Amino acid sequence: MRGLDRLLRPASIAVVGGGAWCESVIHQCRMIGFDGAIWPVHPGRSEMAGEAVFASVNDLPKAPDAAFIGVNRAATVEVVRALAARGAGGAVCFASGFSEAGAELADGASLQADLLTAAGDMPLLGPNCYGFINALDGAALWPDHHGAVAVERGVALITQSSNIAINLTMQQRGLPIAYAVTAGNQAQTDLSRIGRALLADPRVTALGLHIEGIPDLRGFEALAHEARSLGKPIVALKVGSSDQAQAAAVSHTASLAGSDAGARALLRRLGIGQVSSLAALLETLKLLHLHGALASNRIASMSCSGGEASLMADSGQAAGVEFPPLTDQQKTDLRAALGPKVALANPLDYHTYIWGDLAAMTSAFAAMMAPDLDLGCVVLDFPRPDRFEAPAWHLVVDAVLAAQAARGVPMALLATLPECMPEAVAQDVMARGLLPLCGMSEALEAIAVAARMGTPEAPAPLILPGPDCDGHLLNEADSKTVLAGFGLRVPRAVQAADARAAARAAMEIGFPVVLKGEGIAHKTEAGAVVLGLESVESVMAAATAMAAQSFLVEEMLTGTVAELLIGVMRDPAHGFVLTLGAGGTLTEILQDSASVLIPASQSELAAALEGLGIAPLLRGYRGAAPADRAAIMAAITAVQDYVLAHAAGLSEVEINPLICTPTAAVAADALIRRGTPE
């Protein structure tokens, strides 16, 4: 497949079609400064938007570098065929009605297949997309309004949604957008391939993704690797969920580890920052553009209002930002700058004693910026520029710039509301090397996300999920036997066909025992588990009362510190998701879980375990004995090793609960669902 350079950075553009959309492409190119050749193509027109029109693709002076195809879906295929034959650099397919139409248009998928055949190795964007804007070179294969302006360097944006792309270009936050590209159906060229082409441009500083789906996991891994090697961070807003990943509900894992958990685990694994909103996406990109990823989440906050300081403290805690206590040196320097009446803390309310005093504000801001901080934020909300002049506010800007220069620690102006940071101010301070953050909640989320990104080592390739399977369910005894072969510790157990056999098995194992009804999912909820049976009579009575065809009698485990869940789900969108969580009857109540993708390193698994809400129990809460951490890790590793060995056809694995004691970690219940029995 040919590269995307000619398409994304064209010297000549063909516009095929005669409607208003096509005329708009010509206008948008001229408005953003395109100075190359523009060749409209239409069989019945002689002029379009001031340009001479060619009757067909074959009549063009030469093969265009890029083409915008604005004709109906059936005609699009033939135009693509003609462009490919001429040797065009690539095309944007505007028309809809292809595979995205689903059952509404029975021929949509086949027409998209015809489109790909017609293109051959000529790159295509779409179909069902607006195209792209290149604000660096002044090329806009774009049929509608947009807010992009010419820039010399900036961030790149990719989205499947053309309307969201329009909205993002309309931002007034001071973010320089170098490229905005829509991927549409990703029929041939997906966002990973587009992203690699954009990151290769030395004028692009960071990449923002609005992701609806990832069709090629290997390609997405390659994109992350490319970004890592270039030192250019990626931040993503992932939307949507996979119904397939949550369709199988025989386990508790399915309710915890759906596609959202897989997506989060994937982005975290690849070092891609994940945000919760478009606003946070823009603010994070702004931070990354100016400073790159942050080494930590340790920041300082300064404002002239106690209300703002409190709001920063509360919002920062919710976002995952840390405000370190002031050092003795900071306190000494701040006292000298602010006098005796100001309470010294981080976040700092510096009051209005120094308002309008450039030297005093510079001293105070510089005093606050300890060298081990990663960012300093001065909260500053500008008055409406259409109603008030704001010279005193601009003095604050100058003071922050001076403090940044003096301390060498990045600093930001943070407006509590986006509308309180005028676009002209944001653009001006960005040009002067100062970060304008617009909106407190999205700004603090951006800081937290940039601090979590870092530069991770390249992870091992994912285990791909493979095709779906019917899902043969192994019974508990067989599941335990299989997993025990990979090192999982299981209780002593005997299967029994009836109540008398269960009683004999209990005598063989030794009391107390656990009685379980076989072939029943969610045994506790179904009344198919009875614990702590101390006699033959109690086993007989429990088995007689239980609605089960056969039974499993197990040793009763004692000394429990905590119960865990270890589950693996096949997620068709992201691979195999391994979930750790609070186990037993508390699984759905607490919803306390963490997910990683397989294969996961020991450090990833340990971090997921430590991040659980019940981690204090495992460490030994209030003087209680701690759980055997090594035994827990061995159990998790055993499950992962099984998945690695049997990924083909595997649907899910679950241990729930894993009984964690001071000396062991034992699987009290297990299930495996896979395509065919072994």
Image (cartoon, helix red, strand yellow):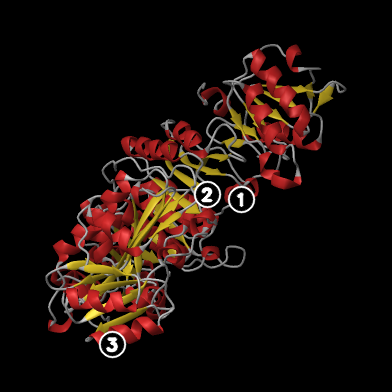
Q: Amino acid at mark 1?
A: Ile
Please provide percent x and percent y for residue 488.
22, 59
- Disc 3 on helix, strand or loop? helix
Question: Relative to the observer, which residue lies in front, 274 or 321?
Answer: 274
In this rendering, would 91 be left or right of 49?
left
Q: CA distance from mark 3 to mark 2?
A: 59 Å
Q: Which residue is mark 2?
A: 210
- Disc 2 on helix, strand or loop? strand
Question: Relative to the observer, which residue lies in front, 95 or 289?
Answer: 95
Q: Which residue is mark 3?
A: 538
Question: Residue shown at 53%/54% (left/top)?
Answer: 244
Please provide percent x and percent y for residue 538.
28, 87
The mark that comes first in sequence, 3 or 2, is 2
Find residue 61 and report its image quarter: top right
Q: Nearer the viewer, mark 3 or mark 1?
A: 3
Find residue 546 and report its image quarter: bottom left
Please provide percent x and percent y for residue 261.
42, 58
Inspect this view and state whether residue 322 appears: yes
Q: Which residue is mark 1?
A: 164
